[in-house]
Image (spheres, rainbow, N blue to C red):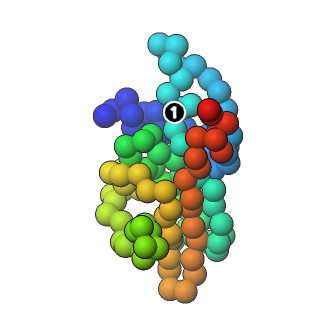
């Protein structure tokens, strides 16, 4: 678990995280843990968009800047209905113990969305 969190923190430090491409690099053991993190496409209210978001297939890691309000986080169920997401702050990261394909961030009437990139969108087969 600590290795996953360390990999997430390293990846979230990379400025390319919210884009579909992730910079390649190698870990100490020759395994590139950051390459295994999934990226997201963001749209909507700039005030609510996280500065970093990614997942390792098990957990989703989200970071907002220090001057941003942290919005309520929702996931869309199969019918498209928003359901509140249970997560927790670990340092500067909001961590969700699950991966959702579509997240919604809300404060009042403002809304932003994050959609998980598919393997083909990440440049993988």
Q: Residue at x 46, y 73 (%)?
A: 80
In the image, farthest residue toward the bottom: 109
Residue 73 visible in the picture: no
Q: How many tags in the picture?
A: 1
- Say few, some or many: other residues with alpha carbon within 10 Å of mark 1 (under 14 / 14 to 19 / 20 or more): some
When the figure is inspected, residue 95 is found, relative to residue 14, above or below; the finding is below
When the figure is inspected, residue 90 is found, relative to residue 107, above or below; the finding is above
| x and y percentages locating residue 57 in the rendered image | 42, 41
Q: Residue at x 57, y 59 (%)?
A: 115
Residue closer to the observer: 68 or 24: 24
Q: Residue at x 65, y 27 (%)?
A: 24
* Residue assigned mark 1: 36
Q: Is residue 85 left or right of residue 55?
A: left
| x and y percentages locating residue 83 in the rendered image | 37, 73
In the image, farthest residue toward the top: 29
Report the quarter where the N terminus lies: top left
Residue closer to the observer: 125 or 75: 125
**Residue 72: quarter of image:** bottom left
| x and y percentages locating residue 7 in the rendered image | 46, 33
| x and y percentages locating residue 100 in the rendered image | 43, 56
Q: Is residue 94 left or right of residue 88?
A: right
Residue 57 visible in the picture: yes
Residue closer to the observer: 38 or 52: 38
Secondary element type, mark 1: helix
When the figure is inspected, residue 41 is found, relative to residue 55, above or below; the finding is below
When the figure is inspected, residue 43 is found, relative to residue 2, above or below; the finding is below
Q: Is residue 88 left or right of residue 37?
A: left
Report the quarter where the C terminus lies: top right
């Amino acid at each position: 678990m600590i290795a996953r969190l360390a990999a997430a923190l390293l990846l979230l430090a990379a400025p390319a995280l919210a884009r579909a491409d992730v910079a390649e690099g190698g870990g100490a053991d020759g395994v590139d843990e950051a390459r295994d993190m999934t990226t997201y496409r963001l749209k909507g209210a700039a005030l609510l968009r996280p500065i970093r978001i990614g997942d390792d297939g098990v957990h989703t890691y989200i970071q907002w800047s220090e001057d941003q309000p942290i919005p309520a986080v929702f996931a869309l169920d199969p019918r498209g209905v928003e359901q509140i997401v249970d997560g927790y702050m670990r340092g500067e990261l909001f961590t969700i113990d699950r991966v959702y394909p579509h997240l919604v961030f809300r404060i009042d009437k403002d809304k932003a969305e994050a959609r998980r990139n598919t393997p083909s969108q990440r440049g993988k087969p």
